[in-house]
Image (cartoon, helix red, strand yellow):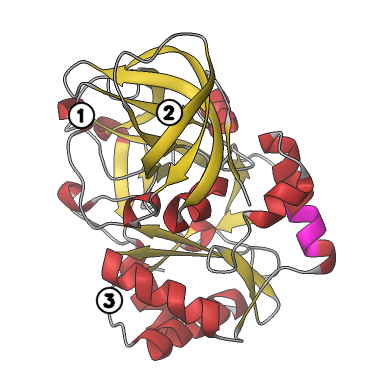
Amino acid sequence: MEEVWASQETVLDHYYVKTVGNCYGVIVGNDHTPFYYIGYLKYCPSSSATYWKGGEVFYERLVKTYDPFQVHKHAALKEYIPFYDSQIPIIPVSIIRRIYDPVERARELLLKPADVLEAKASTLIQALQDCTGLTSGIGVTGSILPGIHNPDLSDIDIVIYGWRESLKVIECVRESDLFQPFTGGLMEDWSSRLSKMSGLPVETVRQLYRKYRRGLFSGTPYSIMFNTQHGGNVLLKPPFKTLGEIIISGMVEGGLDALSYPSEGTLENYKVLDSTVKPPYDVTEITSFETLYTSILFEGGDVLVKGLLQCSERLEACRILVGGVEGKGFVKPVS
């Protein structure tokens, strides 16, 4: 596999980078700085055999899940970012040797898959193209992107760039029988794992499951992530300050901003049920680092929310941050 370059200006969520020391890092979100990307190292060379291999080099997976707590724990480099009022894992631009573009890698798989998993990923991408009519915006990420995947064990991780493209893919996957939902043991495993990670009951976790986010394609697990094609300098965004914890009931408007990472959902109305401090401004949105809540924030509806109350003097508004390392919180659908 040829290593795919991308210019610094185009680096988006779920791009991969190769660093000095031949580690592979994952880019998180679209907002970065000229000096570093928000992201973390996920794979580094191993002295013993592992599931992941590129050429003659085996790789150890440093971060086992996309749980924000795991990512933060294993990140060696962090910077304080005022927009999040938190220390955030980063990858300095100075240590990056290669940048891997998911869309270019997807095109490569369509032309010349190198093994059985790449062939299945190619078939999945082709199925999305046939179903949606899209010729761009579909990328492949995860261990397939840098070519260190295990053909027998790795999943297929897809990332969609652009709101128009994302909506087309969501509609396609919802309606197509080629994409099968988790059932039986797979659903048990997934919901139990997410229940332990989030602290929510298994039944609530199942309510948040959507096959447009993850499921089975020809027997192989897939995940699909969505993203706008635009980014900016995170240091130019308005600063927020964490004031305490808050619990509210309310209604989320629903919308496309929930699909990017971190997810954002606008509050139409809310009632404060408990708070360690009185919000100085109106609470206007929910921001979530936990992707489990993407579906409810995207689709909208009545919710019960617990998280960190963060407020911005510049915006004269507050938000609830969920899934941060300082406070896990939750977003529960209320039926």
Q: Quadrant of residue 186?
A: bottom right
48 to 220, vertically: above or below: above
Q: Which residue matches tag 3?
A: 136
Q: Position of residue 173 (x, y in %)?
A: 51, 77
Q: Which residue matches tag 1?
A: 35
Amino acid at circle 2: Ile
Q: Secondary structure at mark 2?
A: strand
Cα distance in 3D space between marks 1 and 2: 28 Å
Between 4 and 80, the one nearer to me in the picture:
80
288 to 178, vertically: above or below: above
Question: Given the current orientation, which residue lies at the most extreme bottom position?
Answer: 130
Of the two numbered discs 1 and 2 in the rendering, the one whose residue sits closer to the viewer: 2
Residue 320, labelled with which disc?
A: 2
Which sits earlier in the primary sequence, circle 2 or circle 3? 3
Instruction: Label the magenta part by its dominant secondary structure.
Output: helix
137 to 33, vertically: above or below: below
Q: From where the camera sits, is residue 76 visible?
A: no
Of the two numbered discs 3 and 1 in the rendering, the one whose residue sits closer to the viewer: 3
Q: Which residues are magenta?
A: 186-190
- From the image, which quarter does the N terminus lie in? bottom left
Q: Position of residue 219 (x, y in %)?
A: 71, 78
Which sits earlier in the primary sequence, circle 3 or circle 1? 1
Whether tag 1 and tag 2 are in contact, CB under 8 A, the answer is: no
Amino acid at circle 3: Ser
Q: Position of residue 100 (x, y in %)?
A: 34, 56
Residue 326, labelled with which disc?
A: none
As for residue 188 lying within the magenta part, the answer is: yes
59 to 206, vertically: above or below: above
Q: Quadrant of residue 305?
A: top right
Q: Secondary structure at mark 1?
A: loop
Cα distance in 3D space between marks 2 and 3: 34 Å
